[in-house]
Amino acid sequence: MKTIVITGATAGIGKEVAKVLAQRGFTVISNARNLNKAAQVKQQLVQETGNPNVHFYEGDFSNLESVQQFAQAVAKQFPAVDVLINNAGTWEMERKNSQQGIEMNFAVNHLAPMLLTLLLLPLLKKAPNARIVNTSSGAHRRNILLFDDIEFKNQPYNGVATYSQSKLCNILFSLQLQEELKGTNMTVNTVHPGIVQTDLFKNMETRNWNNTPNAAQGARSALYAALSPQMEGISGKYIYLEQEDPNLSPMATNKQYAQQLWNVSLQYLKNYC
């Protein structure tokens, strides 16, 4: 039975994905900043699905050292990982810095999942046909990627711009990772969950949620990319719901940007992987 790592499974889309995975009998592993909350979520998932193989380990995506420790905990307990779903994310509208002093949207949404992926590659290589699923957003189409000021230190902070940039980074990371994984048993794809009712928007002005899909609807893209037989051996796609979305921005398909971002990101991560 498959072993699947899904980040951010204590709430929102991640929790809904974890529930479906547990219902299907998979071993489900996730990180949690708050282990007390995680214990409650685990109990709920086990009761609802009848699957006891739900595991939470401490892992705070605003702290690269904590991401490293989470990966180490997974590697200590599990010999292989079949699927990695990088779901956890944030949207900060005012400037905040991570534990390492990095702008928060860039740190949590891009650097943390990139680090986790790199650290788990040895476990993914041990699976017969491993899949990596990265979560992006339609916000990537704002085409913001400031290599000369990627943390917005030298200009007025803009939460929409930094979030949008981090979501473009998710796609460019997938693009370069696809190159890095050629000839292996691993595929990588990016998903867009759509605009759904989750805590991601907690820092936004009050929204009118009428007719807005719930988190279970938002989980469909990740579940399709992670489990669908149609995605076996398929890499480099941008998935919305159960199909490929061809409407990527031109910047999101730029291999030169993907390579440059990869190199910049490795400089941030060099002490952790």
Image: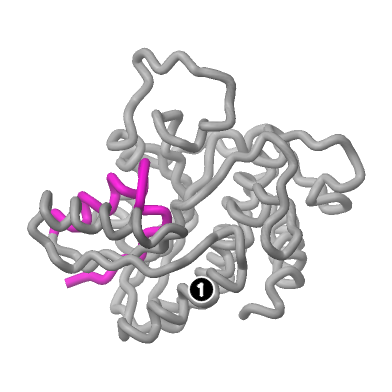
Q: Where residue 73 sits in the image (x, y, percent)?
A: 41, 79
Q: Residue at x 32, y 56 (%)?
A: 226
Which residue ends up furthest to the left in the rendered image?
Answer: 50
Q: Which residues are magenta?
A: 1-24
User: Where is residue 105 drawn, in percent x and y?
Assistant: 65, 47
Task: Specify the amino acid type for callout 1.
Answer: Lys
SS assignment at label 1: loop
Query: Mark 1 packing: few (<14 Cα in 10 Å), some, or many (20+)?
Result: few
Counting every numbered tag in the picture gives: 1
Q: Position of residue 260 (x, y in %)?
A: 76, 62
Image quarter where the N terminus lies is bottom left
Residue drawn 39% across the image and 29% down it:
197
Along the viewing direction, whichever of 197 and 245 lies nearer the viewer: 197
Residues 102 and 248: in front is 102
Q: Is residue 10 magenta?
A: yes
Location of residue 95 (image quadrant):
top right
Please give the residue where the numbered disc 1 appears in the rendered image. 182
Res 118 → quadrant: bottom right
Image-based side of 83 in relation to 250, left or right: left
Q: Is residue 92 above or below residue 39?
A: above
Residue at image position (46%, 59%) is 33
Q: Is residue 243 above or below residue 42?
A: above
Q: Is residue 89 left or right of residue 185?
A: right
- Closer to us: 13 or 37: 37
Q: Quadrant of the C terminus?
A: bottom right
In magenta segment, residue 272: no
Left of 216 or right of it: where is 67?
right
Q: Residue furthest right?
A: 154
